[in-house]
Image (cartoon, rainbow, N blue to C red):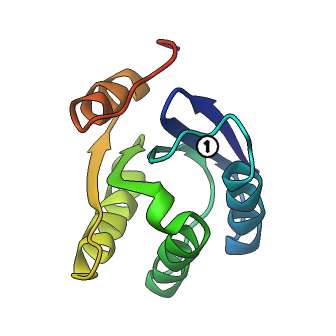
Amino acid sequence: MVSYVINGSILELRGEGEYGTGEITMVLIAAKNDPKRVVPSFLLIDIRESGSNPSIGDVSARLAVLRHQLGGTMAPAVAFVVRGLARDRLAHIYQARAEEDHTRPIRVQVFTEPAAARVWLEAQGAVASDTR
């Protein structure tokens, strides 16, 4: 399952259990059309509870969906929150792929706690509405 919440200018996506790129797309469309979303949106992607194991191709497809759905309304800073070595490696794959697009690179940082991710996003210019 993929869900989102809006926390000021931070769009927080959470992946739990198994999910695919189609579900991510539907959630991004809903978030993009949410009148509470602030532009630019800074992303915090929490995959600590994810059971999904995407391939390198899936990672590229998911980044393409992210860019397509949010495009120029997305700030070029994304924070991943992970748990465990496998999740950490996955986040670093996203990091490498996101930085490969030299036309619009995205800075990706990896954290183990959402609070640390929010602090980093705020240093990049995000404004959080609460401190969950």
Q: Where is residue 67 in the image (x, y as percent from the top left)?
A: 49, 72
| Residue 97, image quadrant | bottom left
Q: Eyeballing the image, is 32 above or below 48?
A: below
Q: In which quarter of the image is residue 117?
A: top left
Find the residue positioned furthest to the top. Answer: 131
Mark 1 surroundings within 10 Å by alpha-carbon count, few (fewer than 14), some (14 through 19), many (20 or more)? many
Q: Is 129 on the left-hand or right-hand side of 127?
A: right
Q: Using residue 41 as the reference point, say whether residue 88 is left or right of it.
A: left
| Percent of width and height locating residue 1 | 76, 51
Q: Which residue is drawn at 32% across and 71% down?
A: 98
Q: What amino acid does circle 1 point to? A: Arg
Q: Disc 1 on helix, strand or loop? A: strand
Residue 118: x, y in percent? Answer: 36, 28
Q: Vertical placement of 13 versus 8: above or below? A: below
Q: Looking at the picture, how far across and down is residue 66, in whole percent?
A: 54, 67
When the figure is inspected, residue 117 is found, relative to residue 90, above or below; the finding is: above
Residue in the picture at 49% in, 87% down: 57
Q: How many labels were placed on the picture?
A: 1
Q: Mark 1 points at which residue?
A: 14
Asked if 49 appears above or below 50 in the picture, the reply is: above
Task: Say which residue appears at 51% left-offset and 13% top-offset.
Answer: 130
Q: Which residue is drawn at 67% across and 58% down?
A: 28
